[in-house]
Amino acid sequence: MPLLEVIQTRHVSASIRLTDSTALLVDQYAAFIKAPADNVVEESLKHVFAKDRDFQEYLKSPEAQRITPTLRVRRANANDGAEASPKKPVSTASSASQTPAVVAGSRA
């Protein structure tokens, strides 16, 4: 019997838009817990999904299986295991207007 169990997880890279203030909070929380920002987003979403009872009921419905995907997932080439372009840092400078910041989220 093996001593370790290795669980393979499929990760994707997706682009999302956040306001400057939310992007700053993600970066600040990542620094606070000493983890990558991707992990903050991943674990935050898992937490919300698990705690929302109405959403858990919705997931059991046939309607949940017929959604139209809106998340922009970047597909890697079939023979390319790495992302096509390196991640760029998110600018967290505050501005007078709340313009959306684009954050590339890859779960590695």
Image (cartoon, rainbow, N blue to C red):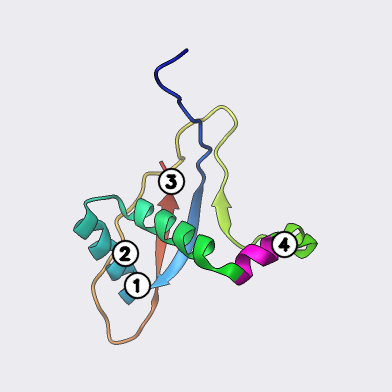
Is residue 2 positioned above or below 83 on the image? above
Q: Residue 47 lies in what quarter of the image?
A: bottom left
Q: Which residue position holds label 1?
A: 22
Is residue 3 positioned above or below 19 on the image? above
Dot placed on the residue nearer the N-terminal end, 2 or 3: 2
Q: Residues within 10 Å of mark 4 (few under 14, many from 20)?
A: few
The picture places residue 51, in percent across and down from the top left corner, at: 50, 65
Please report contact status of discs 4 and 3: CB closer than 8 Å, yes or no. no
Q: Which amino acid does label 2 sit on?
A: Val
Dot placed on the residue nearer the N-terminal end, 4 or 2: 2
Q: Which residue position holds label 2?
A: 26
**Disc ID at residue 107:** 3
Q: Which amino acid does label 1 sit on?
A: Thr
Q: What residue type is labelled 4?
A: Ala
The residue most toward the top is 1
Q: Which amino acid does label 3 sit on?
A: Arg
Please report contact status of discs 2 and 3: CB closer than 8 Å, yes or no. no
Q: Which of 67 and 77 is in front in this view?
A: 67
Q: What stretch is highlighted in magenta?
A: 54-59
